Amino acid sequence: METWEEVTFAGYILEPGNAESYKTGDWRSRQKPVINQEKCTFCLLCWIYCPDGAIIRKEGEVEIDYYHCKGCGICAYECPSGAIRMRSEMEGE
Amino acid sequence: MMARKVLALNGDEAAAYAVKQCKPDVIAAYPITPQTIIVERLSDFVADGELDAEFIAVESEHSAMSACIGASAMGARAYTATASQGLALMYEMLFVASSFRLPIVMSVANRALNSPLNIWNDMSDTMGARDCGWIQIYNENSQEVYDFTIQAFRIAEDHRVLLPVMVCHDGFVVSHSTEGVEVLSDGEVDSFLPPRDPVYPLDVEKPVTIGCVGVPEYYPEIKYQQEVATKKSIETIKEILREFNESFGRSYGIVEEYRTDGAEVALLTIGSISGTAKEAVDEMRAEGKPVGLLKLRLFRPFPIEALRKSLSGLKVVGVVDRHISFGSCMGGALNMEVRAALYEMKDRPHVMGFPTGLGGRDIRVEHFLKIIDELLMIAEQDALEEEYKVVGCRGPGCIGP
Ligand code: SF4
Ligand code: SF4
């Protein structure tokens, strides 16, 4: 990360609209949701409930945006088909 | 060269006249005693068409500073003035101005803080604001107010500095005392102070975000950058001061020495009280006592090197504060700072503080003679019994009345 000589003058943000490139996913609770696409019925309850908008709706299936997912587990709790499992970060992919 | 004009101006009028010549784009101010005359004069100048500035008559000092911040951030030259409770009400925004690195200039006619309600002079207002990140310049008389108001804009707007500047003068003693002030011509001010050249002016093609969140991963870097800029500004301040002296025949310094040749003890003063203290030094010198005086012009950034140089070789220094820093170890902020600056110096002098002239209490030559007697005694005994003693107060433990 930048040193005090490298950060912008007084912390000004010089490029507009850079919120898009700001990754908030560098922290998550110690678990992350994993979708079993075979069980998923595309009911989109997870997409509605996720408080971080981290469920991405694709053609016929849902995906998780791990940059924004905070690992709260709401999606797994709400999924009526048991298609989402919360997995320990330690487990690996 | 034609002789310069000498105008009869009090400290407030001198500030207003200088500001007019510095051509601010925006003035946002709220009148408060003893600064009111500045605001009145400037609004006259604008109303009479002598000054082409946006005069914003705000409803409070918090808004005055906020308006200046907005104006300065977009690239305007912004000015305000305040005192005492007004400065206190601005407090939150003072940090914002300096952290945004905005070159706002503000006159402060120093006045005591309530309570009890008091409109008279001491420095509890600006001394309390010493950690807000502003440059602080203190002036002794109307001439200095005039000269340093002009320099303040140059200092603030210099790209190596980019910090707000407080130009302080004592309420009533300076603000309402009319003196002859040798003023520069408009042309001279123009040549010394070019129009502001903002680094990030408001530009819809190149928008910037100012004042965003600074998470712990960034906050320290941004703050240290500000600290380095503030510390380094002293070099630029000296350079601008030198240029001003040479261009206009003045002889100001960051720390000014008065009769210090061969002095063993010295008073260290700030602001208008220096004049009275010099009288006392003269009287003592006439009696052959080795007494001198140092006048501090700049309190932020604190001129550590200049001060160490001026104080080395002295046996005792009496630091004359104009406020009390309640519960601190040294009575006043100036005394604390001076002692701290000298701590690592070999053969440092004894340093004793004298918080003085609180809430406008008149401090006369006799008071200074008593202070000097105390300093000479410390020099003789080579020992200090008390860190500070309040001067101009009735009762035990003080030098009064
Ligand atoms: S774990 Fe929480 S944040 Fe992550 S996708 Fe599920 S509901 Fe959204
Ligand atoms: S809630 Fe479960 S079943 Fe419904 S879309 Fe999400 S993962 Fe699929």
Image (spheres, coloured by chain):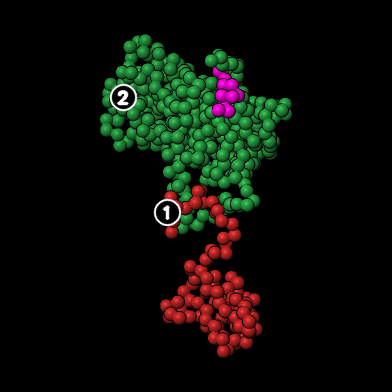
Chain colours: A red, B green
Q: Main secondary structure of the magenta part?
A: helix
Q: Residue furthest top?
A: B286
Query: Is residue B183 part of the magenta span, yes or no?
Result: yes
Does any portion of residue A44 appear in the rendered image? yes
The residue identified by callout 1 is A3
- Decide: is A67 above or below B301: below
- How would you rate the neighbour count of disc 2 (Cα within 10 Å): few for under 14, some for 14-19, many for 20 or more? many
The chain carrying label 2 is B
Residue B23 vs residue B149, the one in the foreground: B23
Tell me the amino acid under the disc marked 1: Thr
Q: Label 1 is found on which chain of the structure?
A: A
**Taking B179 as reference, is B231 above or below it?**
below
Q: Position of residue B335 (x, y in %)?
A: 40, 32
In the rendered image, which residue does mark 2 sit on?
B314
Question: Which residue of the protein is positioned furthest toward the bottom in this rendering?
Answer: A38
Q: Residues within 10 Å of mark 1 (few under 14, many from 20)?
A: few
**Of residues B33 and B249, the one drawn nearer to the viewer in this rendering:** B249
Determine whether, in the image, residue B58 is placed left or right of residue A4.
right
Residue located at (48% from left, 76% from top): A31
- The residue located at (59%, 57%) in the rendering is A16
* Highlighted magenta segment, given as a residue range: B182-191
Q: Is mark 2 within 8 Å of ligand 1?
A: no
Q: Alpha carbon of mark 2 to alpha carbon of mark 1: how far?
A: 42 Å
For residue A30, side relative to residue B288 (left or right): right
Q: Position of residue B327 (x, y in %)?
A: 44, 38
Regarding mark 1 in the picture, which secondary structure is present there?
loop
Q: For residue B112, which quarter of the picture?
A: top right
Q: Residue at x 44, y 52 (%)?
A: A6
